[in-house]
């Protein structure tokens, strides 16, 4: 007894199955060149990803910078803005090596964060460890809360 492949399509369309598979493969290939970049931009946001937090005395910025040489990071403070610049370089491709997927990106980056508070720019401190840059920005003295003692006369 012969086994026959069952299909919901009428037999007149069976000749087009190969073309349909080819179209699906072409769509997949094109989406890997266009769709992935869009998803990467939308899904992962901007580089580097950062957390900004604060307490009563300081602001803290933590930026994930894997693969970035800390000597190539430039941090500047102008007014209420913190600017972070740098470049992530990837090793050169070896001849004869074909990538199946290449998601790590390289290139220059620049992030400007509005701090919305005045800081003491002369006391800003930055440390880089395990691919994470930690920047500590002390708030300006005039912004720190002060306890005022009520005096009584007499």
Image: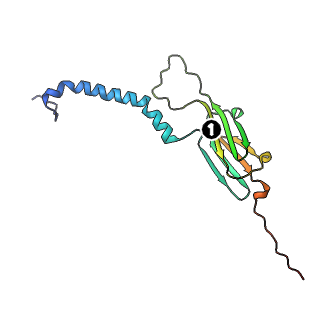
Can you give x and y, in whole percent of width and height, for residue 46 in the image? 56, 39
Residue beneath the point at 67% across and 55% down: 54
139 relative to 108 in the view: left or right: right
Q: Which residue is mark 1?
A: 65
Residue beneath the point at 72% across and 33% down: 71
Nearest the viewer among 50 and 119 is: 119
Residue beneath the point at 79% across and 47% down: 123
Residue beneath the point at 45% across and 26% down: 100
Q: Secondary structure at mark 1?
A: loop
Nearest the viewer among 3 and 13 is: 13
Quadrant in which the C terminus is drawn: bottom right
Can you give x and y, in whole percent of width and height, for residue 131 in the image? 64, 39
> Around disc 1, counting alpha carbons within 10 Å, would you say few (fewer than 14), some (14 to 19), or many (20 or more)?
many
- Hey, which quadrant is residue 49 in on the image? top right
- Hey, which quadrant is residue 33 in on the image? top left
47 relative to 3 in the view: left or right: right
């Amino acid at each position: 007894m012969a086994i026959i492949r069952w299909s919901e399509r009428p037999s007149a369309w069976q000749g087009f199955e190969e073309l349909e598979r080819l179209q699906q493969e072409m769509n997949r290939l094109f989406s890997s060149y266009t769709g992935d970049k869009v998803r990467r931009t939308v899904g992962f946001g901007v580089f580097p990803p950062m957390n900004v937090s604060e307490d009563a005395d300081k602001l803290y910025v933590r930026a994930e910078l894997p693969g970035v040489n800390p000597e190539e990071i430039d941090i500047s403070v102008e007014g209420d803005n913190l600017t972070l610049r740098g470049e992530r370089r990837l090793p050169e491709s070896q001849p004869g090596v074909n990538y199946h997927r290449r998601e790590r990106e390289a290139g220059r980056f620049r992030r400007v964060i509005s701090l919305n508070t005045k800081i003491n720019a002369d006391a800003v401190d930055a440390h880089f460890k395990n691919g994470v840059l930690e920047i500590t920005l002390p708030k300006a003295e005039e912004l720190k809360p002060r306890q005022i003692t009520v005096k009584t006369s007499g």
